[in-house]
Amino acid sequence: MAITSNISNKILNQELSIQVSLSGLSFCILQKDTNTISFLKHFAFEKKQNPFEVLDTLKHVFNTEEVLKSDFKSVYVTHVNELSTLVPKPFFNEDNLADYLKFNSKILKADFITFDDITINDTVNIYVPYVNVNNFIYDMFGSFTYKHFSTVLIENILVIEKNSEEPKVYANIDSDHFEIIIIKNGKLLIYNTFEYSTKEDFIYYLLFTTEQLQLNPETLHLVLLGDIDKNSDLYKIAYEYIRHVNFGSRHDSYKYLDKPKTNYSDFTLIKSF
């Protein structure tokens, strides 16, 4: 979804990606002329905030991080929350956004609901963005583009797995939630997001989801993205129950002045460009 204004932007070489959640903020700057990620920074909250507190923190970051006071050719915002649902394009009617979403998300009457087209698999992602954040970014930069983070995740995994025949189970790990994306024959079988607080929560949701699709833990391939490594309790318990566990990749060609922790972390933040 693009928000536009009549403000004419300078033709600049740098672009900004911002990821917004109730658990933290992330920022990434791409120098287009040199294909270089020159800035990458995360601000994790000690406890989950509400959207008003998130906006206050966002304003503070823009006031204190000198590099963010630059001009940018393009600005991308990804909204991270569980308030989203996928609808096949043939069944989509823009007049029924709240009806689609209310079946699996707790929404309020005043919530603004929007959608992203996921053309690669002919679906529509309906979701609630953080409107106060969008308004602030618009006031700062004028035109910018925003999406739900699951749109970026699904689009890019479908591209990566377009020629894959065997089932692939992707788990994108964050500090308090994770997403499951299951692909077979290049097609999306399921997307879901789960909150977790223990490794047992994680493996329960993972195995329960794969069981619903009759996938065998002995033969399925689990691909991990995000905030996880071989020392993680989540990795260790996944490896106990699933035979084939691997780490994924962003498959990007950027040079990095500020390096991500791994080549499979910050997937949606960097893939938003």
Image (tube, rainbow, N blue to C red):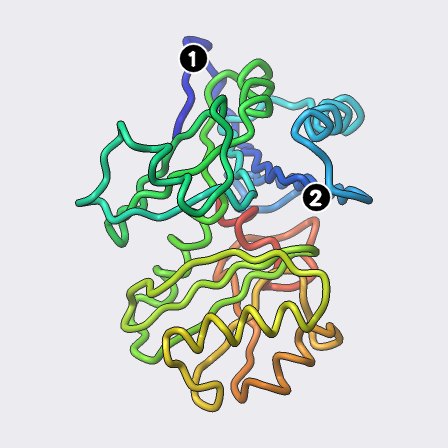
Question: Label 2 is placed on what type of residue?
Answer: Ser
In the image, 230 versus 243, the foreground residue is 243
Q: Residue furthest top?
A: 6
Identified at 51% across, 73% down, the residue is 223
In the image, 99 versus 263, the foreground residue is 99
Q: Is residue 248 above or below residue 123?
A: below
Identified at 46% across, 10% down, the residue is 7
Identified at 72% across, 61% down, the residue is 197
Is residue 16 left or right of 183 when viewed as pictured? right
Q: State the residue position of label 1.
A: 5
Q: Secondary structure at mark 2?
A: loop
Q: Is residue 184 above or below residue 145?
A: below
Instruction: Tell me where residue 60 appears, x and y as whole percent.
Output: 77, 24
Identified at 47% across, 24% down, the residue is 109
Q: Residues within 10 Å of mark 2 (few under 14, many from 20)?
A: many
Q: Which mark is residue 181?
A: none
Instruction: Tell me where residue 165 appears, x and y as whole percent.
Output: 29, 78
Q: CA distance from mark 2 to mark 1?
A: 30 Å
Q: State the residue position of label 2.
A: 23
Instruction: Tell me where residue 16 appears, x and y as whole percent.
Output: 57, 34
Instruction: Tell me where residue 95 appears, x and y as whole percent.
Output: 26, 27
